[in-house]
Structure formats: structure tokens, C-alpha cells
Image (cartoon, helix red, strand yellow):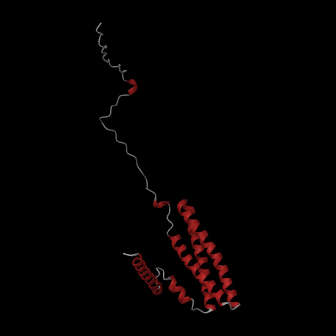
Amino acid sequence: MTIRTRLGLLAATLALVGAGFAAAQDAGTDDDGAAMQVQRRADLTPTDQIGEGQRLLSNGQSLSTRVQTMLDEARRQGDVLRVTCLDDKLTQINAHIRTLGDRVEALQESVRLADTDRQNHEYTVITVLGQNLTQLDRGANECIGSDMYETGSTRVVTTIDPATPTENPSELRPMTPEVIPFIPPPASAR
């Protein structure tokens, strides 16, 4: 097979692979449906976009309160593993809420200034932050505690083989060294 033939086959393969990727993107196949959801919501009016941003902000604040309650309960139980996990999730949730609040304000400002490019950008960022909060909610609910590793009460049972000697080794008579036979070297012929 010549180099020209190989290059032709490679180009054809790449074209088919690219067409497959394009078809998959056009179909909107996303596990969470996030791409389709963003497209549908982009058709919202500016007022609806602001309302959606405020709804996501309110949901985030409720989530923060709920995770804080879970964290307090884990602390009361002394569950270090769950405390660590929930504390991490709560920190991320609160950071997302602060960013979401800033982005909602920026969206309101862009609507006031009739800057549609900035408005679409801010709304897209708000939507992504909302999706991240949903993921953090799932993560907080999946935080496992030390109860997953507890074995319960344990009992140790010791069994002694009856064939085990019962004498105290220090009371036994000392062993005498065995006699090692000594063979003298052969005598010389003189």
C-alpha cells in the first residue's frame, strides 16, 4: 500500500469520525440533558432569566442551610469522616452561592444596559452554577460516615492446643551439651 493510499484512507476515516461527533452533538445526547436545557432556557425573556437566576440563588441558599444542618448533626455524632466530607461540600456550595449572587447582579445590570451579549454570557454562567449546585447537592447526600466502617462489638477467643507443653521453661533441667565425636587426623607414615 502506497503512502498516498494510506493518507487517503486516513482522511476518509477522520471524515467519518468527525461526522459521527457532529451527529452526536446535533442529537443533544447529554447524560443530564444540560445542553438541551440551556438551549431551551436561552429563549427566555430577560425578566424570566433574572427570575431563573434568583430562583437558583434561593435554591442554593436552601441547600446551604440543609447541608449545614447535616454537618452539625455529624459533628454531634463525632463522625469525623462525614464532617470532613460535608464541610468540603458546604464550602463549595457557599462559594457557588456568592458567585451566583454576583452573576445575578451582573445579569440585572446587563439587562438594564440592554447588552444582550453580556446578558447571554451571564445567564449561561448562572445556568452552569445552578448545575454545579445540583451536583454538590448529590455529593453532600453521598457523604458517608464512619458507621460504614464500624465492625460492631468484637470478642476475642483464644484457643490453646492441648498438645502444647505446660512446663515453665525456666524450671526445666538444663540441657547438657551433647558429646561431639572427635576423629583424630590420620597418622603420618614416618
Residue 79 can be seen, yes or no? no
Residue 119 located left or right of residue 188: right
Q: Quadrant of the N terminus?
A: bottom left
Horizontal and vertical percent position of residue 164: 32, 34
The foreground one among 51 and 17 is: 17
Residue 153 located left or right of residue 114: left
The foreground one among 7 and 112 is: 7
Horizontal and vertical percent position of residue 10: 42, 78
Disc count in the image?
0
Q: Quadrant of the C terminus?
A: top left
Horizontal and vertical percent position of residue 187: 29, 10
Horizontal and vertical percent position of residue 118: 66, 86
Q: On the image, which quarter does residue 69 sit in? A: bottom right
Residue 141 can be seen, yes or no? yes
Relative vertical location of residue 109 with respect to residue 154 in this rendering, above or below: below
Q: Residue at x 52, y 86 (%)?
A: 37
